[in-house]
Amino acid sequence: MGPRGRDRERGRGLSLGWDEAGHPATAPGTADGGTGAPPPSSSRFSPRARRILAITAATLLVAALTVGLPRLLTTSSAPERAVTDFLQAVVEGDAEQVRTAVEEAPDASPAALTPEILRAATGRLESFEIAGVEVRGDTATVTALLHGGASTETVAFAVSSRSDSAFAPVAWELDPVALPEFVIDVPFGVEEMTLNGVSLPIEALEPAPPGRSPQLALQLLPGGYELSILRSSHWTQTATLSLEAPMTFGAWRKPARDLQIELTEDGEQEVRDQIDADLADCLRSTSPAPQGCPFEAPGVSAEGEWALLEEPEFEIVHSSADGLLWQVWGGAAAHFAPQGGPGVDVPFDVVGIAYIDPSGELRYRSDGSGDAASFSYALCMDAETGTVTGILMLSDEDEIEEWSGSCA
């Protein structure tokens, strides 16, 4: 026979959750006399609660790994490495790598960043050393000492971190680097210039619209450069200008306005010959006030003879049109001997302009009024390229009004 009811083991109550005090609750009439206290050997948490705690812990672990694992991975580069690579490219004249790091300027050309031009520069960056690194989150500032020529400069570079994903290594990249810039006023009629002996066509550098003196902006690495321009003409000579870009990397811009085309010795002699011819025509006049001539005898009405007392001394200087037009300034003296009266000495000014006409010839025009501002001229341009080819002098207001732009 089975055990009697009174001999059976006491039943154990089922957990009904948690009571208000935070202890497991049991059903009434349990073996412990209805007190609800669990046996000393039982767990504090129920299986359901333990499952919830396990799931929560796993979730927190995944979150911690997602945030912290990238920082535990070895970074692919350090902030100073990005700066070192760039500066080493500058030292070696690696134009391709330099171009990839240089900030794109909206109005300045990188055309001078070529191996030939960079390696021919004087006083360029010779060596460098990293002086300090300061990291602030995803950005860093790297300070470098730059040595070039006889100078040493301290320059700060901005570097930023980048990662393709949470689990990818962190890479430090150099922020775009600004370079020194020179703004160059190019004379009219110039189609090409050279920098350190390397040809740079003006058309490829996006100059100002036709009809205006082109103005170009060039990005240059620190160092010395020689800029030369030559207008293809028998009368003009090469103009050169030295450019010194400072040992720095940052916003820096300087105008270069002293690039002027001068006449050759043959050109100056041609101007002198034409001035002498003009004066000879004036001296043949018997009028005390020859028309269109730079001299007249004041207070004299009688005819007479003119004679040159001293040869004119003058200088030829460039004007606003630079490569196509030059102003002529100087002075001389003449003597007028009227019939039946005393002679008079007349000092006078030599004022005029020398210019290259559309055919390429050098011309001189005297201004008898002594005021060079009275000249009127038009720029002749090639119909296809827009290149200024010469100057057409306009003699009077009627001719100015009738001029239609043709320089044929």
Image (cartoon, rainbow, N blue to C red):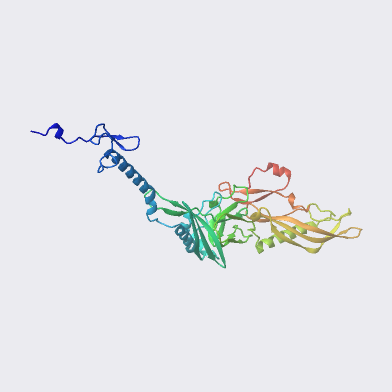
Total marks shown come to 0
Tell which residue pokes out farthest to the bottom in this image. Answer: 150
**Nearer the observer, 30 or 350:** 30
Q: Quadrant of residue 45?
A: top left
Q: Is residue 398 above or below residue 329?
A: above
Q: Quadrant of residue 182?
A: bottom right
**Is 236 left or right of 371, judged from the image as shown?**
left
**Nearer the observer, 386 or 104:** 104
Tell which residue pokes out farthest to the left in this image. Answer: 1
**Is 380 left or right of 103, judged from the image as shown?**
right
**Nearer the observer, 375 or 366:** 375
On the image, the x and y values in percent for residue 270 come to 68, 61
Whether residue 364 is visible: no
Screen quadrant of the N terminus: top left
Whether residue 329 is visible: yes
Q: Is residue 23 above or below residue 172?
A: above
On the image, the x and y values in percent for residue 389 come to 61, 51
On the image, the x and y values in percent for residue 104 come to 51, 51
**Is 181 left or right of 172, judged from the image as shown?**
right
**Nearer the observer, 50 or 368:** 50
- Identify the residue shown where x is 39% and y is 52%: 71
On the image, the x and y values in percent for residue 400 come to 70, 44
